[in-house]
Structures are given as structure tokens and as C-alpha cells.
Image (cartoon, rainbow, N blue to C red):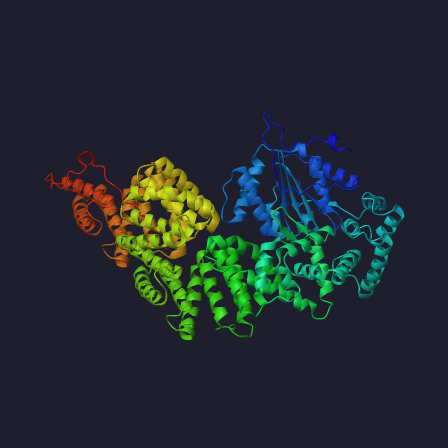
Amino acid sequence: MSASAISPSPRERPDAAPIPIRGGLPPRNPDFTGRWATQNTLCRTLHGSGAANVVPQTLHGLGGVGKTQIALEYVYRHLDEYDLIWWVPAEHPAAVLQSLEELARRLGLPVRADRRRTAAAVRDALATGERRWLLVFDNADNPDELAELVPSAGGHVILTSRDQAWAGHTGLVEVDLFHRRESITLLTRRRIIASQDADRLAEKLGDLPLALDQAASWLAATAMSAAEYLDLLDAHLNELLSEGRPRGYPTTVAAFVGMAHEQLRADRPAAARLLELFAYLGPEPISTELLHRGQRGDVSEPLRDMLRKPIALNRLIRHLCRIGLVRVDSNRGVQVHRLIQHVLRDRIEGMPGLAAECLGNVVAILAAANPGDPDNPAHWPAHAELGPHMAAAGLVNDPSGSARRAVLDQIRYLWASGEYEQSRGLAQEAVDRWTNAPGEGIGPDGEWTLLATRHLATAVRSLGDYETARAITARTLPVLRQVFGDDHEHTLAAASALGADLRIAGRVQLALEHELDNVDRHLNHYSLDDPAALRAQNNVAVSFRQTGDFEAARTIDEHNVEVARQTFGDNDPRTIFYWINLARDLFGLGRYREALLRLESLYPVYRARLGTGHVHVLLAARTLAMTLRKVGAYLAALTRAEANARGLHQRLGADHEHTLASAMTYANTLRAAGRFTAADRVAASACTLYEGKFGRRHGLTLAANANRAIILRRRGHVRDALELNRSVYGAMRETLGDEHPFVLSVAGNLASDLALSHEPAAAHALSEQTLQISRRIRGHAHPDTLACARNAAIDRRAVGDDDGSEDSSPADVLRGWRADCDIEPPPS
């Protein structure tokens, strides 16, 4: 059946076809041979299902049978039949997520810090869009991890895999060895071998396409005769057969790789050492820049000398490419197929001492290439490249200090870049390994173990597992104090974590006292412009905001901004972080337009540098939505608040502190826009989750209930609002005192409930008391003080005590329009 006999119809072509989208496509193989039956089967099965119900087709078979080449040839034969074709390298879940993230950008979809959320958005957009599309997931050998990322409607999907478990998710198209005539055609079309010799070589290689292609590349690169090649192959084949077939790989492939390895060791020992190095790296590309940085490590010769000479290194890589052992991608990343890696490792491990030397070289290179300073976004690309190779080389098991430092930096980088789940996973692995292993600096109370444990606490706290984080800090901090002393840098960093735990637990005054002591200790150890000192001072500002002292927080944050600008630069995300905190202070001080001016200029830069889905960007977006509402831009505020609530829910889950805060911001905005029923639905859900997560009397739960009481009153449920506000007011006064801004907000709202419940005297007394405290604490010009003044004037008229002295908003007073004071707690 010809390809044109089947009409692809994931979507009917619209009159005005969209501009085609192509991504990740490898170059077409000019030597592609045969496979007509497989191509026709793939075409028929793909087009046999409608757009509403995609049945992905998996090209299944052993490594080296040509699955990728068949998929690639299908793509090029049908290139004009699709509006979108996207090639996804699927050997590692992280690579899949990265590729789908790039597709999201091409489709104009929001990119989130949680890449699985981004992938889900791509999947859903393809299912509902009008494009005719094809996705290829190449080397998808992790069905359990990847199945949910594969679209199930709207287009066509091809996967290539050695894992037959895909049969439970997709249709399977079996890819077998070449027929002999196909093998001979592949070998002879390059005119490097006669048909008779090609037949003999195909027999020796078992008609495996990968082995045949590699053999052809070798013969073309070395000008070796077919007879000589066959003689060498015979010797290696006999040797391998005497030891048994390598696990999971055809003997012929192992024989070819072994022969190539031995020839390199004899003729090009530096190239052999480089190939041996690649055997112990991950299958992801690795840059020559990283390899060059690694020459600072304790690497054996001649590898170390080669790493010092970029030109010689590139020359050896080109040679390995020519003989088909490695490939170089468009970004100059060097990559060895995992099949070759495994065969090489099997061979190396049979050579006394070589495996240990190779693995030692890999560890030394990766540790030396670690750029350090994981909080610096300029270093994040290097950390991202290192990560997969560190995992493959098992750096967490290496006893050297440089390797352990690289592991800790990787944990911190993952956290700083917003990959909290991965940070937690690596930190937990390090803690488990180092706690239970003997050696210097490890064991339960070893320095490296304690540092990994502190990073673990940070990651689990950021993921919302507050109890676990508190337990880890409570267990670790006393040990650090005992081992290193109160003022050691390790102890000071862990002490900062204790402050965060106290704030999240609602013990804000105790947290402030602790942070003030901790910042003094930091300044005894660090200079004012040291990043650690800035973080410690920032924690004090966070605690001041929690206690309602926004002016004190502003003083600190203004200093932090200036120091960060001089240290990091104006557009560094760390500088913008401090700017956003200063905007939060201005918001708390009622200086909404100043805060909005800052946020509108900073937020786009922040988003561009960190990505839409980074948690810090999402928190900044919430502050922007709050501020827009306060200046009366309700439509813009509502759009942002809704998107922010959805984004944080997807990123952190339903009951995370930040998710719940964004939900209440959304509820407050719905209320301000007059959508009271929707506001109550959102607020009620958030209040329930707050209580389950933090408890009924926690400050965050109380603030959420105070906001809901406003909504209830606006819906006409005055008695319910009165009862709820009375409960909240009493609990807040016990926890925060009479003069906390949040308590004043609740008091003003409670006065409104009393007035509407026909208790004018009680309303008058409470509104007058609240007004006087607010003027003293927040100042006469604060918007919430002005709201208190309006309500007090209304209550004064209601009890016949209107002397005309309060006339700041006479029209509203005459109409009896009371002002609401909602609460927007800053992040803990």
C-alpha cells in the first residue's frame, strides 16, 4: 500500500492552514533501506483511528533494530500531511518534559515550574485544537512514567521503545531484524563492500540494523578491508560467545563495540579513554565545555591532558562520530547511545582496574565541573547539565568532599530553580546514603549528612510538608549547635529554617525574636552585603510583616534592595526578589499605587528570568492581583487572581499555604467585583482546607474566615457573618493582641455586622475604638484608617452623636455605605 493511498485526518485541513510547526527532527537518513511492510503497517494503524480517539503506535523491538530510523522516515514521507510535527527524545522523563515545555512555548501556552503541568497543558491543547499533528516519542522506555504524557485524542502519536509494557497503553508494531536483502543493500549502497562480503558480514552481525550501520561507518572511516574486518569480528565473536551473551543485548552488537573499543585502545588510546568516560556518563548530551572544566579534577592521563586541549578533544570526538560510536547534537552536546554505553561497561568491567579508573575519572570531572553558588541563576544551566550525569555516575556514593559538595549544590540548585520535588528526592537519597555509611563527615551526625538534612527540610517545607520540616529542623539544629557551635555558618543557616518553621506554625512573635538574634549572629560572621546576611535580614523583614509592622519591614527591604542592586545587578532575580518584598511592605502600608508601579515594572522581568510557573513568580503575581484590586482595577485583578489561584493549585497542590492564600485573594477579588456567590464558594473551600492544614485557631485560618465573613454579609447573611466575626475577633486578639492590623480589620468588619444586626451602640463603641487605634498604629492616611473613619461616622449618626467633625466622605456617610477591610496575609 502506498503512503498516498491513506488520507490522514486527525483534523480536516482548514481553509487557512496554520504555519507548520516542526521541532526536534533529526536529519533524514539518506541511507535508509527497506522497511516497506513496517512503514505501511504503521501508516495503516495510525490512520485507522479517528481524531477523537488517538491510538498511539509503538515501534517495539530490541535496541539497534532501527525503530528510530523507521519513525524518522515515516515523518519525512508524510511531512506535508501535518501542521505540527514534534520529535520528543524520551530516554529520560526529564528530557520529555523539557521537549514538551519547548512545544508549549511554540504553541503560546503558559510554561509552569512544574513541567508535568506544562506537559498536561500541551496534551490538552493538542486534543482540542484544530491542527493536524504528529508527536514522536523516541526511546520511550519508561511506560509507567511517560504514559500520562502521551495525548489520547486529536492527532497521531508514534513511540519507539524496547519495553513491551507499552502494549498496555498503545498498539504495538513489531520491528524485527533486517531481511538479508535489506542488510546487503545497506552495506553495498555506500560502495565500500562487495555483495558477497556484505552477505558474510550480515550473517556475522545477525542482520541487526544498528550493527550493520556501525560496521559500514567503521569501514568507511578506516578504509579497512571487509576480509580484515571479518577476521577481527570472528575473533571477538568467539571470545564473547565463550563468556555468554551480554545481558539484554545481541551478541553481535557486543562483538562490534568490543572490537571498536579494542582497536581504539591499540591505535588511538586517548579516543579509547574518552569513549570509556562516556560509558559511565548518562545518556543525555554532555557539552565539551563541561568536559573542559572537568580537567581541574584528579583525572588520569592521557585523559587529563586531552581535556586541557579543546582542539584535540574535538578532534577525538569527531573521530568517534565518524565510526558511529557517538553523536553530536545541534547544541554541540556529545551523546553515546545507551546500548553502546551498556555494552562498553560490560566490557570494561571485565578488565582489571579499568572500571574503577573510568568511574573515578567521571566523578572527578563532574565534581570539578560543578560551578558552585547554586543560588546564582547564571550557574543554573551548568547545574542542569550536570544533574543527569551525576545520577548516572552515582556521585552520591563517592567519598570525596568535592563529589559530596557537588551533590549538595545540585540539591540547592534544584530548590532555587523551583524544582522542589527533585530537590527533595536527591536530598533524601543523600541523607539515606550518608546516614548509614561509615566514613569521614558522614554517619548520623556527620557534617555532610547534616547539611543534606538541612536541604531536605527546606525542600519538604517548600512542598507544604510543614510537620516533617519542623521535625527535621528540631532534630538537626541541636546537633549542629553541639558539633559546630551557635555561630558557625551551618548552624546559622539551620537557625534560619527554625524561624520559617515558627512563622508557619503561627508563632510569629517568637519567630521575630529568633530572627533578630539570628541576624545579629550572621553579621558577626558575614559582611552586610554577603548573600547569607541578606537572606537573614530578609527573614527578619518577613517576620515583621507577619507581626504587622510593615514600616520596620520596609526599612530592611529598602536596604536589601540597594545592596542586591550593587551586588547582583538590577535585573538579577535575587534583586527582583527583594524588590517584590518591598512592594509587599508598601501594600501593607496602604501605599497601593507605589506598590503597583513597582510590580508592573518588575513582574514581566521576573517572569522572563524565572518562568511563569516558578513559585516566586506566582507569589509576585498574587501580590500584583491584590494591588490591582486595591486601586480599583477589578477586571484586571480578577483575571490575574483567577490565573494565579489556578497556577499555584497546579504547582503546589490544594492545601499549600501559598495555594490557599491565592484562593482567598481570588475570593476577595470576586467579592470586590460583585460576584458574591462565586466568592463564597471559593472562600468556603479555602477556609475548610486552612482549618485542616493549620488548625482552627491559626492566624491564617482566622484571616481566611474574616474574609469569608465579609462575603457572607454582602450576601445578606448578616447573622452568620456576625457569629463568625465574633469568633475570629476573640481568637485573633488572644493570638496577636489588640493593635495588629489584621485584628483592626476584623474589628472594623465586626462593627459593620453589629450595625446591620441592629446593635448601633455596640457598633459605635467598637468602630470608635478601632478608629483611634488605627490612627495611632497605621496613621491617619492609611486606606484602612479612612475606612474606619467612614464607618465610625455612620455609627455616630446612627446613635445621634453626629457633630459634623467627621466629613471625609460625606456622601458615603449619608448613604450609609460601609467600607470593608479584607485581609491579605503576606507569605510566610
* Residue 37 visible in image: yes
| Left or right: residue 180 compared with residue 70 | right
Of residue 443 and residue 665, the one placed in the foreground of this image is 443
> In the orientation shown, which residue stands out farthest toward the right?
196
The residue sitting at 49% across, 65% down in the picture is 452
357 vs 200, left or right, is left
* Quadrant in which residue 484 is drawn: bottom left
**Of 729 and 441, the residue lying toward us:** 441
The image quarter in which residue 396 lies: bottom right
> Is residue 553 positioned above or below 133 on the image?
below
Residue 421: x and y in percent read 51, 56
One can see residue 153 in this view? no
| Residue at the image position 42 percent from the left and 68 percent from the top | 490
Q: Please determine whether, in this image, residue 791 is positioned above or below residue 141.
A: above
Give whichever of 2, 231 is nearer the camera.
231
Q: Kindly identify the residue that appears in the image at 71 percent across and 39 percent down.
A: 74
Residue 650 on image: x %, y %: 48, 47
